[in-house]
Image (cartoon, rainbow, N blue to C red):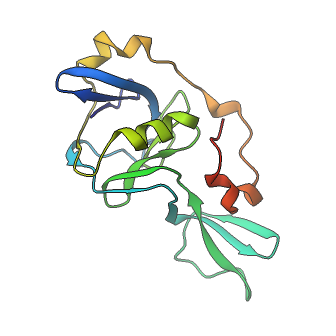
Amino acid sequence: MKVSLRSQTVYVLDGAQVIWAAATNVGKPGHATPTGSFRVEQKLQRKRSGSYGFWVNGRRVIPTESRSGSPPGSGWHYVGYPMPYWVEFLPGYGFHEGYVWAEPHTHGCLRLHGSAAEQFFRLVEVGTPVRISMTQPEDETVGGSVPRFDDSHAPDPANEFLVSDEVFARPWE
């Protein structure tokens, strides 16, 4: 597979033939998506972040940018941000379902919109080569026909939804 950071597109190839392509969201300034050649290291259908998430105490939920801090008090526990259909290519970096913006907006991961994340997850295997660069030749031939999304104006899902198991049961569309 190939990823074009500039066009925010992922291409899955069989030989030289693109067999699947989708819009993706890449790392924002200060949280760049790594470039280079990698391989899919791991796939998990139900993954939660170990870095970004929420402190939870019963029905009370507080977002946190870092798990390393202390909980807000006794009775609180950490629940990582959901990353359904996780496809890891480097420790801490991978593809997963989430909102896709028109401009770079992630902490370095590559987000895929709704059901595209599940399709991608089922299509690639552990060991699949991953090539990430600023542009790809496929930008000129296929990139213009890939549907684009801008979820930047969509309301964030409720925190209660994000800490629940329901988040893994249906696409975020």
Residue 111 coordinates in the image, percent (x, y): 48, 41
Q: In the rendered view of the protein, which quadrant contains the C terminus?
A: top right
Which residue occupies 56% across, 43% down?
98
Q: Is residue 31 visible?
A: yes
Residue 43 coordinates in the image, percent (x, y): 38, 55
Report the side of 100 relative to 119 (left or right). right
Report the side of 55 relative to 27 (left or right). right
Q: In the rendered view of the protein, which quadrant contains the N terminus?
A: top left
Query: Which is more toward the observer, 96 or 72?
Result: 96
Which residue of the protein is positioned furthest toward the front in this rendering?
Answer: 122
Report the side of 61 relative to 170 (left or right). right
Which residue occupies 23% across, 18% down?
137
Residue 27 in which image quadrant: top left
Report the side of 158 relative to 111 (left or right). right
Vertical relation: 125 (above or below) 12: below
Which residue occupies 56% across, 32% down?
101
Query: Which is more toward the observer, 26 or 127?
Result: 127
Q: Is residue 113 visible?
A: no
Vertical relation: 147 (above or below) 130: above
Which residue occupies 59% across, 39% down?
99
Vertical relation: 113 (above or below) 163: above
Query: Which is more toward the observer, 47 or 92?
Result: 47
Residue 124 coordinates in the image, percent (x, y): 32, 42
Query: Which is more toward the observer, 143 or 114?
Result: 114
